[in-house]
Amino acid sequence: MPSIDLIANVVIAGLLTGLVYGLMALGLSVIFGVVRVVNFAHGEMMTIAMYAAVALFGAFRLDPFIAVIPVAIVFFGFGYAMQAGLINPFITRPEHSQFMLLVAVAIIMVNVLLMIFGPSALNVQVDYQLESYEVGKILFDKARVFAAGMALATSAGLFIFFKHTRTGKAIRACADNNLGAKVVGLNVKHLYALTFGLGSACVAVAGCMMILLVDVTPSLGPGYTLLAFVIVIIGGLGSMPGALFGGILIGVSEALAGLFFAPSAKSMFGFALLILVLLFRPQGLLGRKL
Amino acid sequence: MTQRNFTRREFNAALAASGTLAALSPFGIARAQATKLKVGVLLPRSGFQGFIGQSCQKGADLAPGVIKELLGVDIELMNADTETNVDTARTRAERLIQEGAHVLVGPFDSGAASAIAQVAEQRGVPFVINIAAAPPITEQGYKFVFRNFPTAPELVRNGLALIGDLFRETKVAPRTAVFMHVNDTFGQAMFKGISAIMPGLTNLPFKIVDTISYDPAAKDLTVEVSKAKAANADFLLLVCRLNDAIILRREMIKQRWNPMGVISPGSPGIYEEQFSKVLGKNAEYCMANAPWFNPKMNMTKVVDAAFRKQNPKEQFVFHGTNVAYTFESILIAADAFKRARSTDPKTLADAIRQTNITDRIGLGGPIKFNAKGQVEGNLSACAQILNGRPTVVLPLSAAEARPVFPMPSYKA
């Protein structure tokens, strides 16, 4: 039986990583909740953000915590343009058309990254990356603590935006009643693009934080897209708290599964959790009843 | 421009000629007249083994020039990227054969090597493995598959023997080890090898207190390292690849785990350039007991010179094993082609079986295949990262420096 200290260390690492996972999945959930389009290029977009952080670090020695600002702004613009120019015409088309469109976008992104950066793993090397805080016998990895803090702050900002601003309320109105929103004169297409931009900015922040935890390769994207899906389905597709909760749940359950069973089989437990949720609570743990 | 039409007789004659050529082709009669050896090089130049694949590729790239000078044989390389994927390796091998490769070499991975071996055997094309250690590859009774690299049990035996030498040389006797290994074909083969060989080695003073397997493509090894640290072992016995070795070493530092040493008993990763480049001073004192090049051999000097010419900004020592074994696999094919004077697959395979190359790069005896197509007697060296480069510290006959064990704390 592992010691309490070991369990605590592993749970904390899983919790902190899970928060970053949650932020990544939050972008996917926000986009689906409002636009009703599943972004199959989500993981690839996060990979681009990770490369952007690497490039800014390489060129200007910009810490990912500072790089997050320009990267998120660019991603917001990119997301807005992508929704307005590419996805909006597909909103009324069958779901398989949307699926094919975004899978094509994802494949293009992976190959462009491969052409620009090559297949090698890249990372940033900041001073605090190998440091940790020690509280008793428990270690808190500095980079993970900072990344989790940023994930929480970004999520809180997004909650406040949707709850307390006029634009946020208008976006929620679009999500709740699309026709009603049009009747009262809301510019739905603009709001959709705004939402896609916000979801993309979330992914950008998650990417800038993730580069502190893992090295980036072009092939990383599909794995993260899948992970984001697992998280939002467990948390509840379209539910913002659900995405964060799902991320934490996956992070902690994988960590504990790795500790108590075989570490090499830890991702299997995430999928086992997904099957259980689909069987007993198909709307997700915090999702609305289907 | 005048247009000349085929007559019925000319058409029939052409048809008969092409039919005869096609009919003879499978028996190698037409192929045997080739004056150039087409070598299909299969390596993981992208994917998580991309760095190592690119390193091996350097050995392949310099081979045609060096071999032309040494043996007078013309070689055409047909390069294919396996993308660190077994299925891709299989389809690329098929395609290379379709495109006319006379012999296949590669692929730095046991899983990919097993898949390519099946294709080579089915299609009757010789396949010379550069680096892959899983024993079953040369235990299947294949007639066209050859390997000039130690099998996992040989790697383990050589690696563990060097660990015994290290303890004797430094007069330190750790009592416990935690064993971490990748869970791919190679890692599993090494695990089986260590489990089978360790109990019989009475000269090793330590016992393995915990065994932890992990995914070589893992992005995060926090749990694995936490578990290994909790085992409270004296040193870490590690069977790794490159990326995971980097992630693992970083995680050890984050978790403030300072064992007496990090010793690989026969795997890549630690001696690769990227390991030292990415980790900087944190890579220091890690050790890899790996098949290595013999700096004293004439062939090594020739290849080293060609390497420096082709890669003026790189150091041969970081690519030594990958370059040595990849180059040697092409050398074996070229040497056989020269003796056989034919590209007929069966004749070429028979000639490879008769190989006896004494001037080689790798540590060990001459390159000679046994009845199974396996070269026996390839040796390992203990390479420790000292001053940012892998330095041979054992065996003493080839040592460039004295081994440092226990390793100083990473804070020092």
Image (cartoon, rainbow, N blue to C red):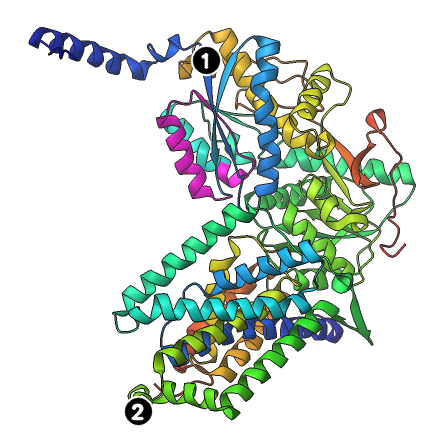
Chain letter for mark 1, please.
Answer: B
Mark 1, secondary structure of its residue: strand
Question: Label 1, on which residue?
Answer: B36
Q: Which amino acid does label 2 sit on?
A: Gly
Decide if residue A96 is on the left or right side of residue B185.
left
The Cα atoms of the two marked residues, 2 and 1, are separated by 75 Å
Q: Residue A100 in the image: x percent, y percent?
A: 32, 61
- Residue A287 appears at what percent x and percent y? 43, 85
Q: Quadrant of residue B89?
A: top left
The relative height of residue B79 versus residue A186 in the rendered view (above or below) is: above
Point 53% across, 69% down: residue: A203
Name the mark on residue B304: none
Point out the residue furthest to the front here: B1
For the point 47% across and 87% down, which residue is it? Answer: A168
User: Would you name the residue on which mark 2 appears?
Assistant: A180
Q: Residue at x 52, y 29 (%)?
A: B138
The span shown in magenta is B84-112
Above-or-below relation of B48 to B163 = below
Dot 2: few (<14), some (14–19), or many (≥20) neighbours within 10 Å? few
Residue B325 is left or right of residue A29, and the answer is right
Q: Does the magenta stretch include residue B102?
A: yes
Eye-nearest disc, 2 or 1: 2
